[in-house]
Image (spheres, helix red, strand yellow):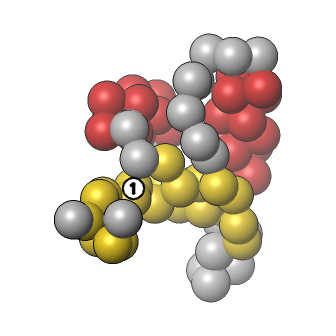
Amino acid sequence: MTKRLFQLGMEPQYAAHVLLLWNEGEYPCDVRVRRAKTEGLIVIEIEDLELANKIVNATRCKVAVKEVKA
């Protein structure tokens, strides 16, 4: 079985806002944060497609979809 992991590459101020909303309980999912290989970008990884779409529409960030074994 595989699951999809959405990798959202965004500028630090957008990542900070997403993490703030997650911390306040607005986004009830697991979130992973790391630095991107592209300088100046932060990657937020989530599994929820609906939430990923919501964040992409708000931030116009870059998206990569990664298939991982569950």
Q: Residue at x 70, y 22 (%)?
A: 21
Q: Is residue 9 left or right of residue 51?
A: right
Looking at the image, residue 54 lies above or below residue 67: above
Report whether residue 17 is seen: no
Q: How many marks?
A: 1
Q: Is residue 4 left or right of residue 9?
A: left
Q: Residue at x 59, y 42 (%)?
A: 30
- Which residue in the structure is indicated by mark 1? 6
Residue 64 point in image, percent of width and height:
35, 66
Q: Which residue is drawn at 65% across and 55% down?
A: 32
Residue 57 point in image, percent of width and height:
37, 32
- Splitting the image into 4 quarters, where does residue 27 fall? top right
Looking at the image, residue 26 lies above or below residue 2: above
Report whether residue 45 is seen: yes
Residue extending furthest toward the bottom: 37
Q: Which amino acid does label 1 sit on?
A: Phe
Looking at the image, residue 37 lies above or below residue 34: below
Q: In this view, does 38 lie to the left or right of 17?
A: left
Question: Disc 1 on helix, strand or loop?
Answer: strand
55 and 39: which is toward the camera: 55
